[in-house]
Image: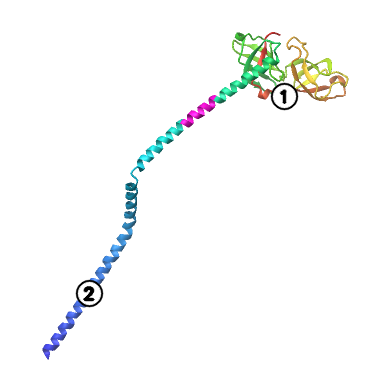
């Protein structure tokens, strides 16, 4: 009976030991599984990315070759674009030169009775008191002082000084300028002077006492005064200003030439 009890106790102890070992091993496996899961969550995204890149490169062996090819094409396109821009600038220059030549041709045909020298304006001095321009022809081109300068629309001014390759021109809108003119409605002479009040206009003085002068009348050079030849268009009457003293009344003449946009002129050499 005693032996049976010892055997029962031994069996219970062994059973307990087995249970303890099962629990220990079960916990160990759980901890290993948790660690493995944590490591797997950290490593797997990186591993997946590397795998994707490897597959991408291995699946497209010309990837880097295509990039180099695209760079070469881009450089070629830049070069062609630069060449096209240069060609466009050259065409614009040719167009501008053709337009200038056409202006010269129109001028020489319009003023065919005069010997003229064409010129570019290379400088402008348009201030309140002085309104002069500098042109790119001078004594070497036969230019002299007091020669008349015209444009397609009409009278510009006259030469006041000359160098070997340039000439300075006092425009008719200069405050010190005075042009002897005549009206289309009368044979009487008037004097047109530059004015401070309006930059693109002249003040016509000594106008006739009668009411013959009207708005829109054409104004031309009269040929008097020894500078400007007769018959060159100056402008048109913009308005007539009456005063208490009829001898003091005057008119505003709008110039035919737009001096702000003036680029090319002719110098008359056979006055």
Q: Which residue is mark 2?
A: 22
* Residue labelled with disc 1: 200
Residue 64 appears in the rendering? yes
Q: Is residue 92 magenta?
A: no
Task: Report whether 26 appears left or right of 225.
Answer: left
Task: Give the left or right position of residue 11, taking residue 185 as reference.
Answer: left
Could you say whether the residue bearing mark 2 is in a helix, strand or loop? Answer: helix
Along the viewing direction, whichever of 185 and 35 lies nearer the viewer: 185
Where residue 157 appears, x then y in whole percent?
70, 16
Element carrying mark 1: loop
In the rendering, at what x and y percent does residue 62 appear? 35, 42
- Please tell me which residue lies in front, 69 or 246: 69
56 to the left or right of 248: left
Q: Nearer the viewer, residue 121 or 52?
A: 52
Could you tell me what secondary structure mostly forms the magenta stretch? helix
**Which one is in front in this view, the residue at disc 2 or the one at disc 1?**
2
Q: Residue at x 20, y 79 (%)?
A: 16
> What span is in magenta?
80-90
In percent of the image, x 37 and y 38: which residue is there? Answer: 68
Give how far across and how far down residue 226 sits, in percent.
74, 9
Q: Residues within 10 Å of mark 2 (few under 14, many from 20)?
A: few
* Figure quadrant of residue 261: top right
Whether 76 is drawn above or below 110: the answer is below
* Residue in the picture at 59% in, 23% down: 96
Camera-side residue: 111 or 32?
111
- The residue drawn where x is 34% and y is 56% is 45
Q: Position of residue 24 (x, y in %)?
A: 23, 72
**Residue 122 appears in view:** no
> Residue 246 is drawn in which quadrant?
top right
Mark 2 or mark 1: name the one nearer the start of the chain. 2
- Neighbourhood count class around disc 1 (C-alpha, 10 Å): few under 14, some 14–19, many 20 upward: some
Image quadrant for the N terminus? bottom left
């Amino acid at each position: 009976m005693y032996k049976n009890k010892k055997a029962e106790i031994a069996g219970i102890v062994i059973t307990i030991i087995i249970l303890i070992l099962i629990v220990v091993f079960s916990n160990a496996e759980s901890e290993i599984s948790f660690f493995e899961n944590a490591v797997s969550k950290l490593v797997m995204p990186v591993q997946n990315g590397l795998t994707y890149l490897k597959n991408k490169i291995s699946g497209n062996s010309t990837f880097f070759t295509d990039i180099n090819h695209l760079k070469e094409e881009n450089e070629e396109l830049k070069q062609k674009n630069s060449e096209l821009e240069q060609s466009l600038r050259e065409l614009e220059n040719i167009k501008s030169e053709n337009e200038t030549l056409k202006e010269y041709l129109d001028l020489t045909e319009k003023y065919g009775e005069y010997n003229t020298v064409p010129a570019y304006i290379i400088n402008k001095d348009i201030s309140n008191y002085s309104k002069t321009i500098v042109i790119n022809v001078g004594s070497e081109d036969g230019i002299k002082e007091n020669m008349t300068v015209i444009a397609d629309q009409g009278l510009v001014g006259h030469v006041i000084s000359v160098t070997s390759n340039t000439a300075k021109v006092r425009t008719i809108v200069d405050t010190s300028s005075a042009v002897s003119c005549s009206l289309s409605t009368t044979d009487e002479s008037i004097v047109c002077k530059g004015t401070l009040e309006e930059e693109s206009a002249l003040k016509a003085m000594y106008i006739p006492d009668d009411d013959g002068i009207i708005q829109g009348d054409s104004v031309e050079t009269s040929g008097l005064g020894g500078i400007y030849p007769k018959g060159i268009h100056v402008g048109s009457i913009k308005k007539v200003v009456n005063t208490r003293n009829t001898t003091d009344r005057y008119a505003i003449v709008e110039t035919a030439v737009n001096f702000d946009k003036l680029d090319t002129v002719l110098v008359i050499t056979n006055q």
